[in-house]
């Protein structure tokens, strides 16, 4: 496991950085293979009825599943993007068929296996736009 420090941005209401014990954010770069999670996938899911209650409940409950790394609520044809990691393709298939597809609010999903992933370890703040300025 490797750790990285990043500077926190300033909030819009204050001129000082957000509080942090070390003046930044710490996150871990986890080797998923060492945790028996050699296969990753992104799962796009659609739920119905599309209500705040269903969205909030689905997001909370799916996030508790051991294979799930992240859950994103999205706009467009899909309602959720779920990042999962499993031991192998067979376990991923079992997760999709035996756990995800059995949920009553799911009306459809599709998965994409991740072959490679690159994460930036340093981020610069984006310049602030003044309302009315064009990009």
Image: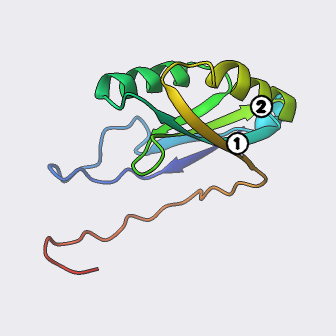
Kindly state the secondary structure of the residue where label 1 is placed: strand
Residue lying at the far bottom in this picture: please name it: 134
Q: Position of residue 47 (x, y in %)?
A: 46, 31
Kindly state the secondary structure of the residue where label 2 is placed: helix
Q: Residue at x 70, y 38 (%)?
A: 30
- Residue 13 horizontal side relative to residue 105, left or right: left
Residue 92 circle label: 2
Q: Position of residue 4 (x, y in %)?
A: 59, 47
Report whether residue 42 is seen.
yes
* Label located before the other in sequence (2 or 1): 1
Q: Residue at x 62, y 18 (%)?
A: 102
Residue where numbered disc 1 is placed: 41
Task: Specify the quadrant of the image occupied by residue 53.
Answer: top left
Marks 2 and 1, how far apart in space? 8 Å
Report if the CB atoms under discs 2 and 1 are less than 8 Å apart.
Answer: yes
Height in image: 40 above or below 11?
Answer: above
Q: Position of residue 117 (x, y in %)?
A: 70, 54
The residue lying toward the viewer, choosing from 56 and 19, is 56
């Amino acid at each position: 496991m490797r750790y990285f420090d990043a500077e926190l941005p300033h909030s819009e209401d204050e001129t000082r950085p957000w509080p942090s014990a070390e003046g930044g954010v710490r996150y871990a770069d986890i080797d998923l293979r060492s945790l028996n999670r050699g296969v990753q996938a992104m799962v796009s899911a659609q739920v119905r009825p599309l209500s705040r209650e269903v969205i909030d409940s689905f997001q909370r409950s799916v996030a508790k599943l051991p294979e799930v790394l992240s859950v994103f609520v999205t706009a467009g044809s899909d309602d959720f993007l779920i990042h999962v990691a499993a031991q192998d393709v067979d376990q991923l298939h079992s997760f999709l068929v035996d756990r995800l597809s059995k949920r009553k609010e799911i009306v459809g999903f599709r998965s994409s296996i991740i072959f490679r992933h690159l994460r930036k370890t340093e981020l610069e703040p984006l310049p602030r736009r003044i309302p009315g300025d064009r990009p």
